[in-house]
Image (cartoon, rainbow, N blue to C red):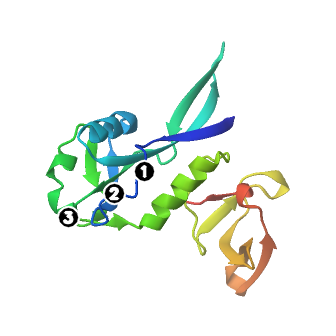
Amino acid sequence: MYSLQKSLAPARSEASDPCLKWYGIRTRSNHEKITAAILENKGYEQFLPLYHRNRRWSDRVVKADYPLFPGYVFCRFDSKQRLPIVTTPGVVSIVGFGKEPAPIPEEEIRGVQAILDSGIRTEPCPFLREGARVRINQGSLEDVEGILLKKKNEWRMVVSITMLQRSLWLEVDREWITAVH
């Protein structure tokens, strides 16, 4: 059962240095909260999106906050001065290409912050891109596989008979499908 979400983030201000970019920080498993707290104590603007989840144990229900992006914390810093970041306990690496950190667009961070600030229920899900191989995970079509397409704001799954070089499509709800690995 999922309900409300929140984030560990300092108050955002317009005074933030526009030269500083947001970066994804890969953390050790289950070290997102402590890593975010240490980065904040070092004076960095960090963002750890969290959602609230009720977990049922055998004798009780436990309410806790979990990272929306497990294994990642977002941090705003100058990429030329990243030594204090990579030496932070819990940090595995900075997300990037090769040895160069790759900035995350400000709009994407603001979008996630706006969703969390709105109070709308959210939870993590696999990243699905149009053209990805997917499988239906429920109902009478469970285990049917195909390719994900989007047409006029509707998700469709294309199922093909390769030998005949023929395909068919069906409309699917986003909640019905999971990525095939």
Say which residue label 2 marks: 16
| Along the viewing direction, whichever of 168 and 119 lies nearer the viewer | 119
- At a point 22% along the width and 60% down the height, the residue shown is 78
Q: Along the horizontal axis of the image, is 13 left or right of 87?
A: right
Residues under numbered marks 2 and 1 in contact, where contact means CB atoms less than 8 Å apart: yes
Amino acid type of the residue that numbered disc 1 sits on in the rendered structure: Arg
| Along the viewing direction, whichever of 166 and 149 lies nearer the viewer | 149
- At a point 80% along the width and 72% down the height, the residue shown is 170
Say which residue label 1 marks: 12
Task: Measure how far apart labels 3 and 1 are at the Cα level.
Answer: 29 Å
Q: Residue 60, how many percent across, how many down?
A: 66, 15
**Quarter of the figure that contains the N terminus:** top right
Sequence-wise, which precedes: disc 3 or disc 1? 1
Q: Along the horizontal axis of the image, is 114 left or right of 89?
A: right
Q: Quadrant of residue 38?
A: top left
Say which residue label 3 marks: 99
Q: Along the horizontal axis of the image, is 82 left or right of 69?
A: left
Residue 50 shows up from this direction:
yes
Task: Measure how far apart labels 3 and 2 are at the Cα level.
Answer: 26 Å
Q: Residue 174, how many percent across, how many down?
A: 71, 60
